[in-house]
Image (cartoon, helix red, strand yellow):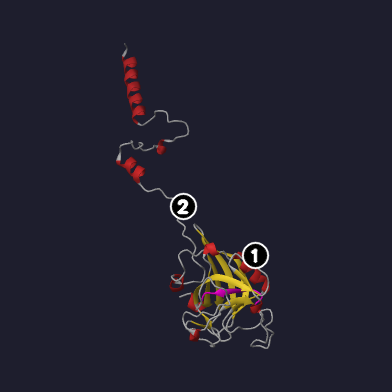
Amino acid sequence: MTVRRALALVIGAVLCTGVLGTGCAQQPSGLSSGDAQPPAASASSPAAEAARTSPQAGPPRSFPRPLPGIGPAMRARLPDGSRQALVVTGATETSNRAEAVLYERYPAEGWRAVAGPWPAHNGLRGWTDDHEAGDLRTPVGVFGLSDAGGRLPDPGALLPYDQDPEFAVSGTGHLGEPLEGSFDYVIAIDYNRVPGTTPLDKTRPLGEDKGGGVWIHVDHEGPTNACVSLSEDHMRALLTALDPEKEPVVVMGPEPVLAR
């Protein structure tokens, strides 16, 4: 071998070693030398174990919707089994105009409005949480709705319905409006009465001085003595909606009190 050829072989070997040392190995298609990936965690590595045991994000939990506008104190008075509630809300303690909304409770969804809002009247002097006979105020609270009746035939009520001519009424109201027809349809509010009896029953468990005969009845375009009144159409709708198996109640009072 000549000196020239031996020198050429030595130079070639040195150049080859330099190329291999600088990473001239072919990169996978589409991957540059700066895209090197870290090795994947093995199934038994701490990283894999953490990924396997970390809690998985799920959909946000939903809770049954409470009765709108009703605060904790009043809500605590709702019977556990009640699934229907007529909420009658006045603006202030002295207001004699109100709004009524019928709600039903569903297992997952909670309370949902199914009828209303309906305009209503209540006692001439507003509301009270200590009703007395003749005070012209409507009692505040949560009361059962268990019995109905009226001068007119049963419109299809699910509650026990007592048709009786004794529901006839005459005279004028506080604004001089005629009262005739006001008791064509009534629903007894279970305030100072015996549930399971006709609304005409005059038994007063709390005594006569605490008043009684507090009904939901047909509106006569004016404030009442203590009752709640709705239009005749809305009374028929309410009578055919209330279901004794759903333990219906009325929740009524001025907005600030109901929200407590």
Left or right for 259, reference 20: right
Residue at the top extreme, as displayed: 1
Label 2 belongs to which residue?
Answer: 59
Quarter placement of the N terminus: top left
Amino acid carrying label 1: it is Gly
In the image, 31 versus 234, the foreground residue is 234
Label 1 belongs to which residue?
Answer: 156
Q: Position of residue 199 (x, y in %)?
A: 57, 75
Label 2, secondary structure: give it: loop
Label 1, secondary structure: give it: loop
Q: Is residue 111 visible?
A: no
Give the extent of the magenta segment. Answer: 183-190
CB within 8 Å, label 1 to label 2: no
Amino acid carrying label 2: it is Pro
User: Is residue 51 shown above or below 192?
Assistant: above
User: Is residue 17 shown above or below 187?
Assistant: above
Left or right for 241, reference 180: left
Q: Position of residue 168 (x, y in %)?
A: 66, 80
In the image, 74 versus 2, the foreground residue is 74
Which residue is painted at 39% across and 28% down in the image? 25
Left or right for 123, reference 61: right
Q: Give the CA distance from mark 1 to mark 2.
A: 44 Å
How packed mark 2 is, by other alpha carbons closer than 10 Å (few <14, some 14-19, many 20 or more), is: few
Q: Is residue 194 visible?
A: yes
Q: Position of residue 100 (x, y in %)?
A: 59, 73
In the image, 203 versus 171, the foreground residue is 203
Q: Position of residue 50 (x, y in %)?
A: 33, 44
- N-term mark: 1 or 2: 2
Which residue is painted at 33% across and 25% down in the image? 17
User: Is residue 248 shown above or below 26?
Assistant: below
